[in-house]
Amino acid sequence: MFEYGYWEIVVINSLIFIIFAFSFVRPKNVTDWRVFGTFSAFIVALFTEMYGFPLTIYLLSGWLSERFPQLNLFAHDSGHLWYDLLGLSGDPHTSPIHIASTLFINGGLLFLAITWIFLYRAQRKGVVAKSGPYALIRHPQYVAFIVIMFGFLLQWPTLLTLLMFPILVIMYIKLAKIEERESIKAFGEEYVTYADDTGRFFPSLKNLRKKFTINS
C-alpha cells in the first residue's frame, strides 16, 4: 500500500511551522526575506516527502532495495532513513533516534519562544537584549532555528533538506553578522561591550569563567 499522497497534511503542517516562524522573525529587508524564504522551502520540502511524495526514497529505491531487500519502500515508516540505515527493528517512532529528534524539535521551539520574550521586551524599550539567553549568546533565536532543523533531519532526512541545511546555517551566520553591524550603528559602544562579553552562537568559556568567578 502506498502510504503517501496526504497533500492536505503537507499544506497544514507547512503552514503551521511557516506561520509560527514568521511570527518570531518578522522579515524587515531583502536579506531577512531571503533567509525566511529558504527556511520555508526547507519546511515544505520536508513535509512534502514526509506525507506527499517520497522523492528521496524514489531516487534511492534501487540502492535501498539491494541493500535492504526486506524493506517495504511504499510504507511510511521507511522514510525514517537513519532508522533503516542503522538496521534497527521495531517501531521507528519509539527508537532513540526519533526520541532525540523530538527533543531537538520541541526543545528548539520552546527555546525560540523563550528568546522571543526577552527580545520583544528589549525592542519595546529600545535597548540591547542582554537578559535571558541573550546574556550568554547574541543570537539565540538562530540557534533555535538550527536546532529545530537538525531535529527534523534526525527524524526524516531527505536529499533536499540535507542539501539545504548547511546553506541555511551559512545564511543565519551571515544574517547574524549583518545584524551585529546594524546594532553597533544603533547602540554604539554599548553593543561592542556586550559583544565582547558574549558568544555569537555558543557561550564564551572565558567569559563564563569570568562571570562565575565574580559571582563566587
Image (cartoon, rainbow, N blue to C red):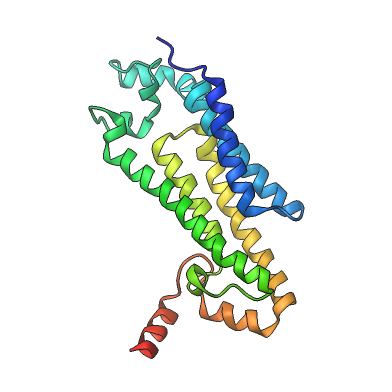
Where residue 182 sits in the image (x, y, percent)? 72, 70
- Identify the residue at image location x=59%, y=83%: 193
**Could you tell me which residue is drawn at 70 percent across and 82 percent down?**
188
Residue at the limit of the structure toward the left, as seen here: 89
Residue 191, quarter of the rendered image: bottom right
Q: Quadrant of residue 63?
A: top left
Quadrant of the snapshot with the N terminus: top left
Q: Position of residue 173 (x, y in %)?
A: 59, 59
Q: Which residue lies at the image location 47% right of the left edge and 57% below the top edge?
A: 111
Residue 215 % position (x, y): 37, 87
Is residue 180 visible to the viewer in this orientation of the structure?
no
Question: Relative to 110, does residue 13 appear above or below in the rendering?
Answer: above
Q: Is residue 212 left or right of residue 129?
A: left
105 up-or-down from 216: above or below = above
User: How many numbered tags mark residues here?
Assistant: 0
Q: Residue furthest right?
A: 30
Task: Say which of 126 and 142 sits in front.
Answer: 126
**Quadrant (top left, top right, bottom left, bottom right) of the C terminus:** bottom left
Can you see residue 50? yes
At which x and y percent is residue 94? 27, 35
Q: Give above or below for 178 relative to 13.
A: below
| Quadrant hosting residue 126 | bottom right
Relative vertical location of residue 118 with respect to residue 72 in this rendering, above or below: below
Kindly identify the residue that appears in the image at 62 percent across and 37 percent down: 41
**105 vs 110, nearest the viewer:** 110
